[in-house]
Amino acid sequence: MLEGHFLLSSGRHSDKYFQCAKLLQYPDRAAAALAPVAERLRKDMAAGKLTLDAVVGPAMGGIIVAYELGRQLGLPAFFTERDSNGKMSLRRGFEITPGQRILISEDVVTTGKSYGECAAVLESLGALVTALACVVDRRTETADAAGCGMDATILPLYAACKVDAKNWEAGSCDLCKAGIPAVKPGSRNIS
Ligand SMILES: [Zn+2]
């Protein structure tokens, strides 16, 4: 976790940034961090509350998380990514079978924007997104989750940890007002 003034990939500003790649670079730590998430998913699957056929992560942040959860759950894992126009899409010959039940996985969830874009692609191909998973749930009360599939009453979110970190819309950021320059460590523009 970095502290400072960050421009998040969602477009919001924050005083904290979670660089999950620093954690996930160690496969043993990635496995340990996601083991409790896999355990809760397994429990709900065994209880008949949840059915999963595959794990899908939006690139870049979701790829390793999806892969590791797929490994622990014994499910195939693949990813959506942006095409040359920046539109989220399913490429590389990955296929969705109509009715296939999908767990979408991410590293950090702030507004659920990546989830929403990933879910829209999969649902347009006939998938049923049944649950969401992440390493860090940093949603706040003020984050706008509307219209991006993040309504917790519809889809359960399985997070390794929940962290309170401030975030603001670009126009109303306390750190901008204080004249502190923002840095952009995210990856939304990387395809
Ligand atoms: Zn700012």
Image (tube, helix red, strand yellow):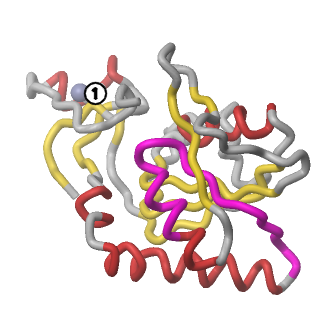
Residue 62 included in the magenta stretch of the image: yes
- Please indicate whether residue 42 sits to the left or right of residue 139 in the image: right
Residue at (80, 31) in percent of width and height: 124
Question: Which residue lies at the image location 22% right of the left edge and 31% below the top edge?
Answer: 184
Quadrant (top left, top right, bottom left, bottom right) of the C terminus = top left
Magenta residues (range): 48-68
How packed mark 1 is, by other alpha carbons closer than 10 Å (few <14, some 14-19, many 20 or more), is some
- Residue 164 screen position, x and y as percent: 37, 57
Quadrant containing the N terminus in the rendered view: bottom left
Identify whether 50 is placed above or below 28: above
Residue nearer the viewer, 67 or 148? 67
Is the distance from the Cβ of mark 1 to the nearest ligand 1 atom less than 8 Å? yes
Residue 137 screen position, x and y as percent: 47, 58
In the image, what residue occupies the spot 66% across and 64% down?
76
- Pick the residue in front: 58 or 143: 58
Query: In which quadrant of this rendering is ligand 1 seen?
Result: top left
Please provide percent x and percent y for residue 132.
64, 57
